[in-house]
Amino acid sequence: MTTVQASCKCQHPPFYFGDYDTVECGDDPRGAEVSLSTCRRCGVVWLTYLIEEPHRSRAGRWWRVEVAPENRAQVSAVSAKEFIERQPSGYAGGSFFNSSGHAIIAPIHIA
């Protein structure tokens, strides 16, 4: 992983979409929305995996992990879930977790 300054906003939830330049990667086979967001302040790229189930109350959930420059070519909508689950740390949040974002460590399991 890239070393990020602890003072950067991208390391401290809650995260604000306006702090990033985001590229949508599309939906994965499970229906999750996958995107790559570059922090406008420090340049770190984050992979986000978002699951929303409108038919279920409090089911929205997301995970995000840093993507090192050498790993960016490996990331796609199809590979996102497995990529995130292999990372040593990241963040998760959403109504499912009753959280606007909290740090997580391996093992990361997307459910």
Image (tube, rainbow, N blue to C red):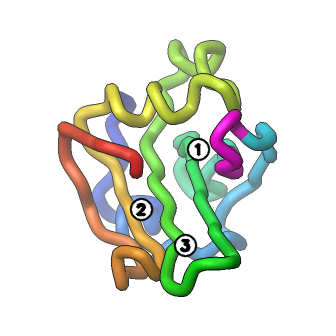
Task: Sort mark 2 into few (<14), some (14-19) or many (20+) by Cα contacts within 10 Å.
Answer: few
Task: Sort mark 3 into few (<14), some (14-19) or many (20+) by Cα contacts within 10 Å.
Answer: some
Residue range (magenta): 28-34
Q: Which residue is mark 3?
A: 60
Residue 51 at x, y percent in the picture: 59, 59
Q: Nearer the viewer, mark 3 or mark 2?
A: 3
Say if 85 sits above or below 24 in the image. Answer: above
Question: For the point 70% across and 47% down, which residue is it?
Answer: 31
Q: Is residue 30 magenta?
A: yes
- Image quadrant in which the N terminus is located: top left
> Where on the picture, by quarter, is residue 99?
bottom left
Depth order, front residue of 65/45:
65
Say if 2 sits above or below 13 in the image. Answer: above
Question: For the point 51% across and 74% down, which residue is it?
Answer: 59
Question: For the point 70% across and 51% down, which residue is it?
Answer: 33
Q: CA distance from mark 1 to mark 3?
A: 27 Å
Amino acid type, mark 2: Cys
Q: Which residue is mark 1?
A: 43
Question: For the point 49% across and 83% down, which residue is it?
Answer: 58
Q: Which residue is mark 2?
A: 8
Q: Number of labelled discs? A: 3
- Left of 86 or right of it: where is 74? right
Pointers 3 and 2 in contact (C-beta within 8 Å): no
Say if 104 sits above or below 107 in the image. Answer: below
